[in-house]
Image (cartoon, rainbow, N blue to C red):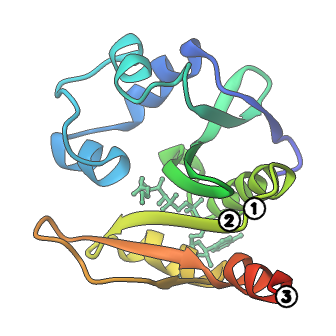
Amino acid sequence: MADARWRPALPTDLVRIAEWIGSAQALEHWAGPGLSWPTDGPRLWREIDGGGLLSFCLVSGSEPLAFGQLVVKGERHYHLARIIVSPARRRQGLGEALCRRLLDEARQRRAERVTLNVFTDNGTAIDLYRRLGFTECGSADSRGIRPMQLRQFVANVDNDLP
Ligand SMILES: CC(C)(COP(=O)(O)OP(=O)(O)OC[C@H]1O[C@@H](n2cnc3c(N)ncnc32)[C@H](O)[C@@H]1OP(=O)(O)O)[C@@H](O)C(=O)NCCC(=O)NCCS
């Protein structure tokens, strides 16, 4: 991970990231329902609003290692989305490093609430989010998508109350 650098994502990153997605189901598990399959870099960039949302990459040189987005959901409420690590670099701590950088970005923007959505059968992702302190904050919908929130940010809000 010593080689990893953090920067805003570029459209060219999505060309490589599209190659990490092997099926319509993998696409849905990563990015949620409603995206086109098969996909490619320009289509992905457009459909996940890479230019409009806060989109970041961990890179080695010009090569993306991991990608994620921050979605503004409301005043001081940020949502982690489209978290993904290169299949060749998984189980090396990059997923955790990516999420910690996204949380830093949210903190710098004075977030008081951070949430995410995850499919209930995505055990690896759920384990990662639990390790970071996220907890379930509602039941799964009919598609099996469950919301989680980070307690630490919520606790900070409570502490700030008069
Ligand atoms: C979910 C995802 C982002 C996790 O990325 P990752 O880089 O593998 O995550 P980490 O390395 O931080 O943690 C994964 C596991 O590797 C382990 N690990 C971390 N560093 C390690 C190391 N140096 N040696 C061995 N294991 C290690 C972690 O303990 C963790 O173990 P666990 O699954 O038993 O809890 C990745 O699997 C992915 O891109 N999945 C496809 C897209 C997706 O589903 N995204 C989530 C959408 S909600």
Determine which residue is flagged by label 3. Answer: 162
Is 26 left or right of 60, judged from the image as shown? left
Is the CB of the residue bearing disc 2 within 8 angstroms of ligand 1?
yes
Q: Amino acid at mark 3?
A: Pro
- Judge left or right: residue 96 versus residue 13: right
Position of residue 10 relative to residue 137, above or below, is above
Q: Are marks 2 and 1 in contact (CB under 8 Å)?
A: yes
**Mark carried by residue 141:** none
Q: Identify the residue at horizontal 56%, vertical 13% (top origin).
A: 12
Q: Residue under circle 1?
A: 100
- Between the C-alphas of marks 3 and 2, the distance is 34 Å
Question: Which one is closest to the eye, mark 3 or mark 2?
Answer: 3
Q: Give the residue at mark 2.
A: 96
Q: Position of residue 135 (x, y in %)?
A: 51, 85
Q: Quadrant of ligand 1?
A: bottom right
Q: Position of residue 3 (x, y in %)?
A: 86, 41
Say what amino acid the circle numbered 1 marks.
Arg
- Provide residue 100's location: percent of width, then percent of height: 75, 62
SS state under label 1: helix
